[in-house]
């Protein structure tokens, strides 16, 4: 059961002549045998609604200041060609009635509402974007979060955690960026990956002949099954020639390493994005982030580097807050950042490199 | 004069109990002093509309098969916090009424309709995407097309031709791809650029010490002014140390080169994307495309390469049609293609390399 919702908007140079505009469309509404209701908007322009066949519903507004809007909703199973013909007829008629007064006509791709496959996954900076998603491969709540794997025609399988696009098969640039942007030599190095459940980092890192990679992640079975193009076969076993996966919470593991004096050349934090505010409900997220950071820097060799993702480049406040945290660690650090295009994100993303002063 | 349009949709496991759902929201509508109209949908579920203060308009539908949809429109100047509080109240109330029966709640970022700055520029494959556009820098009709330069927070200035996103300051990957993806040696070579009015290709090519670049483009003044980050100062003069810009239609220029026997190491066609269908109105576009291709291959040296963009990777039919054309040229050719992520496109794009058999 889904709804297709069409919008058609006319921006005008001067207010429309309302009676003639309304009259002009009457023949179309009559031909379609639509039942009209005119509403009293108490001085906010003309507003009429129409019910047509198959549950079609139309809203026609003539606003006071040079804007005419149309909404047309049709239900699943309706004849889409017929519906689009109706919208074409309305667009043509309005274009002719309003001729000479039109600054812009905007007809957006129809919104699909309530469909089995949800194609709308807003960006981190809150923009509406539609993906070319055609299949749901996995959709379950774990103990920690909702996990979805959706298939996109162009991006391949996409991992979505709690509604946020996390990583797609197309997103090698993400993995490369969070490994230092191709500027590091991993050969013979000891590497610690925090999180990284999609397996992308591990799969890339093992190719670079490191001495040993330790990945600490609770949840990886779903990626191992559904993100094969990203993780290859690296998650099929918890141990490989040069890697081990510890299925544990990373905090106690980090604390143990600090106690033991165990250190790494690279620590890669792929756990979570920078929180976008300091609102109370996010306090714990910031605290968690600081704790991980502090422990990570402690297990970093003097020449070592810590890599992590930040957030969308537009969320400048969140990024500034994060950078302020970096100034308050028990061990003083320098940092640099890079802006990277991650294909499936539809927004530019900031990645950080952090090292000891 | 703009309209904010909010949507809120509940997907249910089983059809909602309509009377109790409707009753449950009554207190909110009454508190908001909204005037209700219940419509006869002739068996297509429950549909009520509400007019509130400040021209607010709400549509509440309970569909027969487990879908509840809400639309809330408010006009410019309305109190957005108040409107979002109303929507929050409705979402909370519905969540409690429908508790245990909810499969998904979807509340999209509000659509802004009729605003001075239009943020919606659908992709080539017809998806709805919102850009972070905050300013209109240029918007005029030339003799050939509508030309817009819009400013995006993250992508910089974006050139939009006839409603299609063409190139943004962020899109060096486009320029690199249409120059051969960084695999070519331009030093000492002769290069012909067809189109390329944004100046990006010319600006990159001159850095590579070619012998001579000839760019044939009618319209470049707008880029020279508004796309400085892309074209630098290269379009400030029609002639440089190793380049000339011919302000002419490329067809007679190509014909003249063929007659004269003039040839090039690289021909870069940045004129237009591959048409998406063979519909009659696009016949002339395909003819134009074939003509350019044939002439371009004729002015290509035996070891030369021809580069061009194709279209969105999802438009497989259009791409296949194009590849069929390549088999019908007067001179037989080979081709290869590459899929590239162009940051501002929000979709993956195909680029072609073509060379003589």
Image (spheres, coloured by chain):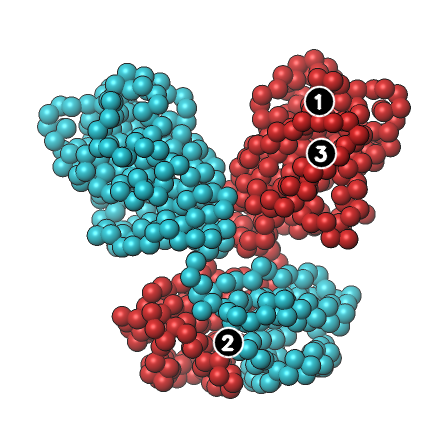
Chain colours: A red, B cyan
Q: Is residue A309 left or right of residue B331?
A: right
Pointer 3 residue:
A326
Residue A85, x across and y down, in percent? 38, 69
Q: CA distance from mark 2 to mark 1?
A: 64 Å
Residue positioned 68% across, 42% down in the render: A321
Q: What is the secondary structure assignment of the residue under circle 1?
A: loop
Q: Quadrant of residue B7?
A: bottom right
Q: Are marks 2 and 1 on the same chain?
A: yes
Measured along the vertical axis of the image, is residue B12 above or below residue B255?
below
Q: Quadrant of residue A206?
A: top right
Viewport quadrant of the C terminus of chain B: top left
Q: What is the secondary structure assignment of the residue under circle 3?
A: helix
Measured along the vertical axis of the image, is residue A147 above or below residue B60?
above
Residue positioned 57% across, 32% down in the render: A338
Q: Earlier in the sequence, mark 3 or mark 1?
A: 3
Mark 2 Cα within 10 Å, few/some/many (few <14, many 20+)?
many
Q: Earlier in the sequence, mark 2 or mark 3?
A: 2
Q: From the image, state whether disc 2 or disc 1 is nearer to you.
A: 1
Q: Is residue B75 left or right of residue A16?
A: right
Pointer 2 residue:
A57
Task: Check the residue under mark 1 and report the chain it is in.
Answer: A
Residue A34, x across and y down, in percent? 45, 82
Viewport quadrant of the N terminus of chain B: bottom left
């Amino acid at each position: 059961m889904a709804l297709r919702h069409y919008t058609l908007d006319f921006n005008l140079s001067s207010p429309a002549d309302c009676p003639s505009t309304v009259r002009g469309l009457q023949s179309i509404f009559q031909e379609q045998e639509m039942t009209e209701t005119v509403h009293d908007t108490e001085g906010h322009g003309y507003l009429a609604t129409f019910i047509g066949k198959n549950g079609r519903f139309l809203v026609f507004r003539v606003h006071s200041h040079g804007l005419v809007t149309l909404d047309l909703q049709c239900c699943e199973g309706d004849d889409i060609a017929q519906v689009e013909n109706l919208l074409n007829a309305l667009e043509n008629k309005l274009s002719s009635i309003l001729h000479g007064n039109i600054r812009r006509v905007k007809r957006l791709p129809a919104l699909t509402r309530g469909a089995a496959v949800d194609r709308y996954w807003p960006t981190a900076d809150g923009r509406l974007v539609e993906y070319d998603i055609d299949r749901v491969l996995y959709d379950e709540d774990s103990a920690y979060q909702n996990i979805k794997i959706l298939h996109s025609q162009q991006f391949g399988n996409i991992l979505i955690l709690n509604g946020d696009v996390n990583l797609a098969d197309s997103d090698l640039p993400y993995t490369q960026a969070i490994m230092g942007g191709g500027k590091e030599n991993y050969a013979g190095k000891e590497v610690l990956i925090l999180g990284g459940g999609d397996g992308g980092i591990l799969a890339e890192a093992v190719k670079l002949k490191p001495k040993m990679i330790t990945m600490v992640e609770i949840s990886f079975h779903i990626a191992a099954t559904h993100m094969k193009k990203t993780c290859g076969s690296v998650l099929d076993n918890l141990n490989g020639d040069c890697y081990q996966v510890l299925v544990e919470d990373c905090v106690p593991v980090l604390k143990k390493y600090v106690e033991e004096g165990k250190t790494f050349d690279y620590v890669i934090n792929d756990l979570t994005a920078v929180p976008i505010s300091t609102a109370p409900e996010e306090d714990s997220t910031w605290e968690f982030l600081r704790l991980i950071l502090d422990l990570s820097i402690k297990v970093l060799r003097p020449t070592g580097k810590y890599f992590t993702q930040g957030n969308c480049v537009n969320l400048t406040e969140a990024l500034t807050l994060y950078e302020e945290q970096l100034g308050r660690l028990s061990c003083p650090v320098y940092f640099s950042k890079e802006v990277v295009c991650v294909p499936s994100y539809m927004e530019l993303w900031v990645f950080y490199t952090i090292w000891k002063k």
